Amino acid sequence: MPPARHNGRVQSITGERALVRAALALGAREVAGWSAAERRLAEWATAGRDGCRDGGEDGGDVVDVRDLRGWIRAGHDPLGVAFCGLRPPRERRPAGQTFTPPAVVASMVGWAAQADAPARVIDPGAGSGRFLAAAGRQWPAAALVGVETDPLAALVARAHLAAAGLAERAEVLVADYRTVTLATAAGPTLFIGNPPYVRHHQITPAWKAWFRATAADRGLSASGLAGLHAHFFLATTLHAVPGDTGVLVTAAEWLDVGYGGLIRSLFLGPLGGESLHLLDPSVPVFDDAAATAAIACFRPGTRPATVRLRRVADLARLGDLTEGGQVPVRVLREAHRWGALLAPPEQGSQQGSGAPAGRPEHGGGQRARPEHSGMWAAGGPPGGAGTVRRGSGGGRRGHPVGQVELGELCRVHRGQVTGANRVWIVAADDSRLPGRFLFPAVSRAHELFRAGPVLASVAGLRCCVDLPSELSGLTGAEAGAVERFLAVAQGAGAADTYIARHRTPWWRVGLREPAPILATYMARRPPAFVRNLAGARHVNIAHGLYPRAPLPPAALDGLAAFLCRSVTLAQGRTYAGGLTKFEPGEMERLLVPEPALLAGHAGEGGPAGQRGGPAHAPARQIQPLDHIRDSQSP
Ligand SMILES: C[S@@+](CC[C@H](N)C(=O)[O-])C[C@H]1O[C@@H](n2cnc3c(N)ncnc32)[C@H](O)[C@@H]1O
């Protein structure tokens, strides 16, 4: 990471105009592909100004261009950092603007560097140009092409490339990657990047229609629930030709959920998937997005017989993506969920020397055997995908009839981390701040255990303070109260916590909307799943279940009741001391009834706090992990 002085300089880029001026001063216009949208941005930013002078100031912007260029030449991305600082995650999320950390960029470039040098490198969704700059340094003759829809990001990428001395062979196209026309390359192209993660709710019907029609042209079916990253995988099959290579990092959910089926088919088919590297859900890969990441390496046009699968417990161990256990393509083709094949050792029934070849590296533990295993070769994982339980009536592929994974219905989000509960969690009657900034919130697990099946009222809950990012619009009285509160908060160290230093502004806790179902996830007892009829927020002691598509209240009631009576401690990860934890991704893999059947479960569950009590009938257990074990055990 750049040192503090660098950050000090970046902070002196005080707004988007200043960022544009800095980009122009660094030579953004020298990179081919200058668009009308960027020209307009440049005019807006420089109206009445001379622009940044090299090494100087610009009417209040203390932007030292020589300094910025120095940092860029040293391999840093100060403009990208500034971009993220100026646009809070909430504003970047709709376009999927989460930039990739240098360690991941280096690993992905490292993997590609083991093959012949590409003639051209394409970053689909170039952002601030991190991949292209790294690629430009790695391959001195490669043409560098970024495709980016956001003109400000495109300008930043141009400046990054220009300052890195790569302008002559770089081009940034302000265009949509799905339909952009790319020139024919002089040789193999490397597709490398981090496709935007945008959920289907924000994808227009027209693009969904494009997605379905384009997939259908290739004989594949595509789901309207697919996120934008699925569109990018599909587009990559359109742009790529045999001999090209690709390495893309995305949120990992496509490995398991229904809509991911298309990506899985593309990976095993036209993309020529070579390896998959799943970063353990506990590894925070992206600064401002809590997503489990997976890296897919592929060589379009090839037909590998095996794919290397690997789970990585630590970013420092990512390496050059050449490791992993070989798993036959046939096994992957038959498995409807790949996460189980990448499960950590403690989730499966085989550990130690008996683990199948596909058992990937985890933590400081054993490494996936790099060799093809006779056991897998003899017919896939015995008891594997081919023997996954199926209902006699032919239910959803590989699931017991009438069941789907919770993750197909709901996203599970851990509650917001405040950074300093002693400051941001206050009594409900705290009078220091206007009521509109106080949000009743579940802030202790026992509040959910105590609530039983339904949280009907916020009485007894404390509040979380969530102030707006922009305080300048507050009225005199409110402004005074907030100012006094922030002074006290600062005095208590709330501005200096790790979390506060990594969010903008430091006081914005950024609570999520109320989740219709709240769940505890770490205790010595099974999780409580509670219908949140009170509209309470939650902090990071609880998970929130957010339906991907609207579910009627009766279905939500049934879902909570079903989970409450069926989930057992055995399905979580047990830590020393007997605490059992369910990470969001693990919770999303629980099997639940299909939406149409959910309402029928309403009213069946006993109060969460009474599970297993004498009056509680023994639950009809579903055993999601049995299902996983089925597909992995001999
Ligand atoms: C996850 S960011 C990755 C940025 C950069 N490649 C990196 O890894 O640091 C995805 C980028 O794709 C851009 N983007 C979103 N939708 C796009 C589209 N349809 N076509 C091209 N770019 C798009 C976003 O503006 C964002 O900058």
Image (cartoon, helix red, strand yellow):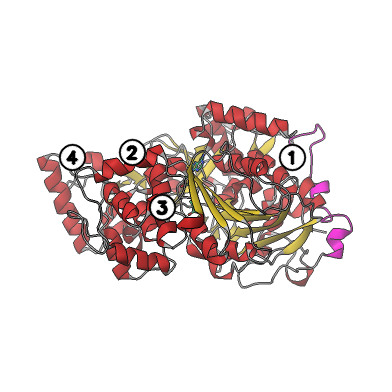
Where is mark 4, residue-wise?
473
Is the residue under label 2 in contact with that under label 3 (CB below 8 Å)?
A: no
Q: Is residue 35 left or right of residue 302?
A: left
Find the distance from the CA under tag 1 to the CA under tag 4: 55 Å
Task: Answer whether residue 286 is visible to the viewer in this image.
Answer: no
Q: Amino acid at mark 4?
A: Gly
Find the distance from the CA under tag 2 to the CA under tag 4: 28 Å
The count of marks equals 4
Instruction: Between label 3 and label 2, give the one nearer the viewer.
Output: 3
The image's mark for residue 400 is 1
Horizontal and vertical percent for residue 32? 46, 48
Instruction: Between label 4 and label 3, give the one nearer the viewer.
Output: 3
Image vertical order of residue 99 relative to residue 226, above or below: below
Where is mark 2, residue-wise?
40
The image's mark for residue 30 is 3
Q: Nearer the viewer, residue 618 or 71?
A: 71
Q: Is residue 398 magenta?
A: yes
The image's mark for residue 8 is none
